[in-house]
Amino acid sequence: MADIWWEPPLAGTEEEHLTGALDRLRTTLRWKADGLGAAGLSTRVGASALTLGGLLKHLARAESEMFGPKLDGSPLGEPWASADWAADPDWDFTSAAADTPAELYALWDTTIARSRERLRAALAGGGLDQLVHLAWPGGRHLSLRRLVCDLIEEYGRHTGHADLLREAVDGVVGEDPPAGWHPTAG
């Protein structure tokens, strides 16, 4: 199975299955966006403003939020902290059009590497049941399990969008990357 490194375990723990499902979705999204230039990353379908470049940047923000401020209260960092979210609440999606493919791939790839490490450390420090910094009104804190499940949901939604967008770009379809696939730059 080394040539299908993104496959979740066949029979693992809850932690292994949740992190495996998240990594499979991350991998599928990255594969759907892989190897494209500016035109491919900015292709739209129908009336939707979504692009593969926008999805890469949006999911990098989702990862940064999940395993930063929501996990432990740490600051969000750049490029998110200096964005004018009041002027453009969809800044992560819309600003991607001004980024080069190399910048988008690097942002997503480095964010995912950092997220994996922060999640590994959090799991080692208290497992899925531990409470995180994020709290609902009334003071009830979410568990790390909830953060992971929320991110799986976010990827599930947007990986479906990426399927349609990539097919519109060059006809690439499929549920998983081909065996032996590894990410490349645009």
Image (cartoon, helix red, strand yellow):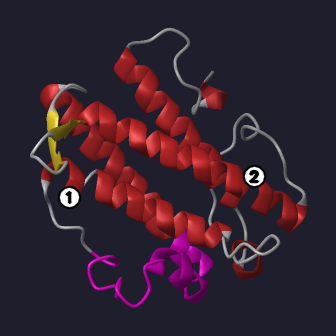
Is residue 91 located in the magenta-colored stretch of the structure? yes
Query: Which label's residue is closer to the chain start, 2 or 1?
Result: 1
For the C terminus, the image quarter is bottom right
Q: Residue at x 25, y 27 (%)?
A: 128
Q: Is residue 186 visible?
A: no
The residue beneath circle 2 is: 163
- Residue 85, relative to residue 107: is it above or below? below
Q: CA distance from mark 2 to mark 1?
A: 30 Å
Task: Please state the horizontal and vertical placement of residue 122, each as a whole percent of the image.
Answer: 20, 37
Give the quadrant of residue 79. bottom left
Relative side of 10 to 107, left or right: right
Q: Which residues are magenta?
A: 78-105
Give the quadrant of residue 175. top right
Question: In the displayed image of the protein, which residue is found farthest to the top?
Answer: 11
Question: In the displayed image of the protein, which residue is found farthest to the left?
Answer: 139
Q: Residue at x 43, y 27 (%)?
A: 18
Q: Is residue 105 visible?
A: yes
Residue type marked 1: Pro
The residue beneath circle 1 is: 69
Question: In the displayed image of the protein, which residue is found farthest to the right?
Answer: 171
Relative side of 32 to 78, left or right: right
